[in-house]
Image (cartoon, rainbow, N blue to C red):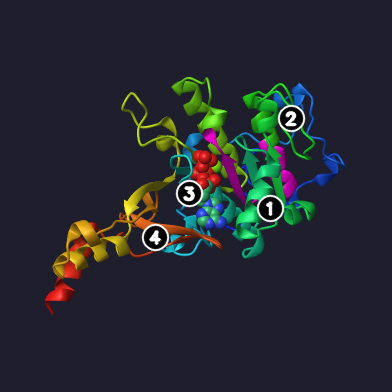
Amino acid sequence: MSYDDQNQPYSNDPYAYQDPSQYDTSQQPQEYTGYESQDAYQGQNYDNSQYQAPPPPEQRQTQAPQQLTRIQSGIPGFDQIVGGGLIRDRVYLLAGPAGAGKTIFSSQFIYNGLTKYGENGVYVVLEETPQQLRENLFNSFNWNIGSYEDSGNLVILDAISSRLGLSSQERFVVPRPFTLEALLYEIQTAIQTAGARRVVIDSLDAMSLELTQVDLRSLIQRLTMILKSFGCTTLLVSGQADTTNQGRKAVEEYVVDGMIRLHHSLEESTSGETTLEQNALQGNSLEEDSFSMKMRSRKIEVPKMRGTTHSNFLHPFIIGENGIEVKAEPEVTKRLRRAIFKAKNVD
Ligand SMILES: Nc1ncnc2c1ncn2[C@@H]1O[C@H](COP(=O)(O)OP(=O)(O)OP(=O)(O)O)[C@@H](O)[C@H]1O
Ligand SMILES: [Mg+2]
């Protein structure tokens, strides 16, 4: 399903994407409290008087394929490795272990949308409080996301407090008791309120606790349908390893349109390694002069991306003072580095 900025919404589906400027805001409370009655979750307020039955199958026509539109993440080096940008309206899984940079990557995607591309955002926090997110981003990168919340361009939805049974002072909060229906409802409200085109759910792991694989698959499918119908390009954050402990792929990997995977590990640094080899080549005693420096090395890969060509290499990235920067050239292996080093010294 693809949305073309120039065209009108293409169906009668009540969840179909509408131009955010066309939303009927007269129905919304002046000051949003985050609380809605349970009735709303059951869809009992839904007015289907305007519903038109679809034509019989023999009169339906095959939709002509539309040109896919792309959006820029604005993360240096990243758009190049996914063929020029993420395909609009699609849902992507951003996976990686703790500390890999998932929250920074997601925040940069949202922050660039706000600051460079005029796209509003929703950030759903399930693992840290909105205030922690604001403080971390301000302290690490000087990104003041609070100012975009104040201007109405960004909604940070607090889904952690009710999940932990705590109260919250946030403007946008999932009410207690935490249920998945309430979460889905509040996500939709947040998207409409912000007129969001970029969404992050951080993270699926917190949302899927105690769910069976079947329930999780259906939850992610529902979430995906909702996000696409609102015309949102979404990152679903997951801390899952490559496969579940039963050796199967995690269900979310099948449901999403694309996957971005972050890795990090301790590695001997290039300078340490070349110094080591230089010493050996110069005949110095390895015991006396050799040393190795270990440092955290970060890499990103794109294992799956429907509808586009993409890099199949592992790419190094750094987290610097302006956030993540991906090296668009592939990771050079140690063996290749050694070969280059030796070739230089033979010349
Ligand atoms: N300004 C900075 N400069 C360099 N590295 C930084 C900076 N700020 C944070 N980091 C690194 O980024 C890491 C955290 O990244 P992030 O919070 O995005 O990880 P995550 O994948 O979301 O982890 P988790 O699964 O625990 O939520 C920190 O542990 C730190 O190593
Ligand atoms: Mg995180």
Residue 128 placed where, x, y %?
A: 63, 38
Kind of residue sitting beneath label 1? Asp
Residue 268 placed where, x, y %?
A: 31, 54
Residue designated by label 1: 19
Labelled disc at residue 63: 3
Label 4 vs 3, first from the N-terminus: 3
- The stretch drawn in magenta includes residue 337: no
Residue designated by label 4: 81
Kind of residue sitting beneath label 4? Ile
- Describe residue 128's horizontal placement relative to residue 250 as left or right: right
**Are the residues at dot 3 and dot 2 in contact (C-beta closer than 8 Å)?**
no
Residue designated by label 2: 46
Residue 167 placed where, x, y %?
A: 77, 28
From the image, state whether disc 4 or disc 2 is nearer to you.
4
From the image, state whether disc 3 or disc 2 is nearer to you.
2
Alpha-carbon span between mark 3 and mark 1: 21 Å
Label 1 vs 2, first from the N-terminus: 1
Determine the secondary structure under disc 4. Answer: helix
Determine the secondary structure under disc 2. Answer: loop
User: Does the Cβ of the disc 1 residue fall within 8 Å of ligand 2?
Assistant: no
In magenta, the rendered stretch is 187-204
